Amino acid sequence: MNGAEQEPARAELSAIGQALAILGDRWVLLILQRAFLLRIRTFAAWRDALGISESVLASRLKELVGHGIFQLAAYRNGRTRYEYRLTGRGLRLWALLVAIHTWERVWANRRQLQPLRHDLCGEDANPYLGCGSCLASMSARDTRTEFGPRAVFSRSGPSRRHRRTVHPVAESDLIGYCPDSMEILGDRWSTSILSAAFLGTHRFVDFQSELGIAPSVLTDRLRRFVELGVFDPRPDGSYGLTDKGLAFFEVFAFLVDWAQGELPGPEGSALSITHRPCGAAFDPVLLCTACVRPLRRHEVRFILSGEGTAETAR
């Protein structure tokens, strides 16, 4: 990594910056998804399910343990072995992963993805983002964000540790995330750029200044976002979020909520987000389209075609 792409030390990152550094990686997302959806807990099972190299898998699992998302637990199967179990911090990522799945079904033309069944009403949930206080649906346009005195993107930029991985997901893979999601979340710079757009950054020079990103990297990511239909280039040189891009706010909402609830950040580096229609502090929930009740992890399950029911991690 050259000097132009250097990022701030990890200790200075805001909680959101830390979350971007942890979760802005394709393999991490796929490991977590399999842990929730298929309840995979062992090294060999992830290796076989993902086709991932053992060195890469070992590295990612070590990081997830270090961040308190997994914990190692011993069990006996003839001899003592170890498995990786989601901690409370890890389990609270379920809403983020469901939000990604929902965005893909609606905006990435993957209607063939397995539906999420809501046990309380017995219907397909078709989740949507709502306010935990008033239970109204909400979008990026319904929020007001105030920055703490140290909540600048120089403290929210990604801490890049891995090369950007490009590994297209086959259309027949009804579990793996699709290329659209991976262009946004599978790369730390891409995730940071979209996060900055949600928080009001729209011009090239402002992205560069806020993120401390190299011009060549920024040019590449902006081009990818335009091709993906997430950004719309404007005549004045700015980039506006399309409907597809705005819809990804649901994912961003749960990333911010998890980050600021689970990860420590420097004093004054947090974002204060308000749901403008009701004036309540930001409390995102997933609501069931069928019964309009909040979805809880223990009350939903994915229905896998030909494979029966797959519970979310308990």
Image (cartoon, rainbow, N blue to C red):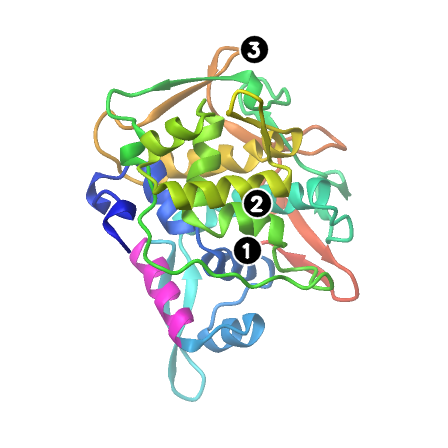
Residues under numbered marks 2 and 3 in contact, where contact means CB atoms less than 8 Å apart: no
Q: Earlier in the sequence, mark 2 or mark 1?
A: 2
- What secondary structure is the stretch in magenta mostly built from? helix
Magenta region: which residues?
A: 55-67
* Residue 118 in view: no
Residue that numbered label 1 is attached to: 313
Asked if 164 appears above or below 111 in the picture, the reply is: below
Q: Residue at x 38, y 28 (%)?
A: 205
Q: Position of residue 215 (x, y in %)?
A: 38, 40
Locate residue 119 relative to residue 63 in the image: left or right: right
* Discs 2, 1 touching: Cβ within 8 Å: yes
**The stretch drawn in magenta includes residue 61:** yes
The residue carrying mark 3 is: 277
In the rendered image, which quarter is residue 251 located in?
top right
Q: Is residue 6 left or right of residue 158?
A: left
Q: Residues within 10 Å of mark 1 (few under 14, many from 20)?
A: some
Residue 66, horizontal then vertical, whole percent: 29, 58
